[in-house]
């Protein structure tokens, strides 16, 4: 599970960094009025350096969300993270669109490459999640089989000991006579 959580955190951090850079560049070219987020708009208007603190708090909130969702069982936390990353990737794509629109360098190729990147990352994360589920199911089945084996072995040992005490004397002598040596 740690591997999957770190992968999701890496994807989100990449999008988070892209959002930070694009927000700063758009605000530099067009001013703080174009920002939709009212908190970021106030920060950009008054103290531009506080945006790093706000973005660090945002990243910390996502890390807390990862920790909180990792305590749940089942597939629901994973789907919540996928939707969250998809939403954040669309937010970064929108910021990139606004930036390229203001600079006059809009490119459809960038959008297609970016969309392909987002879909491939989501697919890669989903495949890792399926692999994790398969491994978890295999380990659970192996653990159940091991516990059943221990239970069966202990039953066999108790029955074997009780049978050894009940063998007739003639049968025990016959078994001792069948002890054949192996030629080398």
Image (spheres, rainbow, N blue to C red):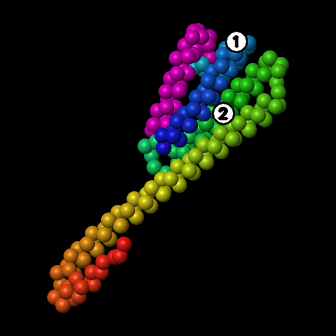
Residue 1: percent from left, percent from top: 48, 43
Please tell me in which quadrant of the rendered image residue 38 appears: top right
Which residue is label 2 attached to? 89
The relative height of residue 176 versus residue 115 in the rendered view (above or below) is: below
Label whose residue precedes the other's in the sequence (2 or 1): 1
Q: Which residues are magenta?
A: 41-68
Report the residue at 31% width, 69% height from top: 153
Secondary-structure class at tag 2: helix
Q: Is residue 11 left or right of residue 26?
A: left
Residue 88: percent from left, percent from top: 63, 33
Q: Is residue 116 left or right of residue 54?
A: right
Q: Is residue 164 left or right of residue 119?
A: left
Report the residue at 37% width, 62% height from top: 146
Residue 53: percent from left, percent from top: 52, 17
Give residue 28's mark: 1
Report the residue at 57% width, 20% height from top: 39
Asked if residue 56 is among those painted magenta in the image, a careful observer would answer yes
């Amino acid at each position: 599970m740690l591997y999957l959580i770190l992968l999701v955190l890496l994807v989100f951090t990449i999008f988070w960094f892209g959002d930070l850079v694009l927000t700063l560049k758009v605000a530099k070219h067009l001013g703080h009025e174009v920002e939709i987020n009212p908190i970021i708009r106030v920060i950009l208007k008054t103290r531009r350096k506080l945006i790093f603190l706000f973005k660090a708090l945002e990243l910390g909130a996502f890390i807390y969300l990862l920790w909180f969702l990792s305590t749940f069982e089942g597939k629901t936390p994973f789907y919540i993270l996928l939707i969250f990353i998809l939403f954040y990737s669309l937010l970064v794509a929108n910021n990139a669109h606004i930036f390229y629109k203001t600079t006059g360098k809009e490119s459809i190729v960038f959008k297609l490459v970016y969309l392909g990147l987002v879909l491939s990352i989501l697919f890669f994360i989903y495949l890792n999640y399926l692999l994790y589920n398969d491994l978890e199911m295999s380990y659970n089945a192996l653990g159940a089989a091991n516990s059943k084996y221990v239970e069966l072995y202990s039953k066999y040992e108790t029955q074997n000991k009780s049978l050894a005490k009940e063998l007739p004397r003639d049968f025990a002598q016959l078994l001792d006579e069948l002890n054949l040596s192996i030629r080398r």
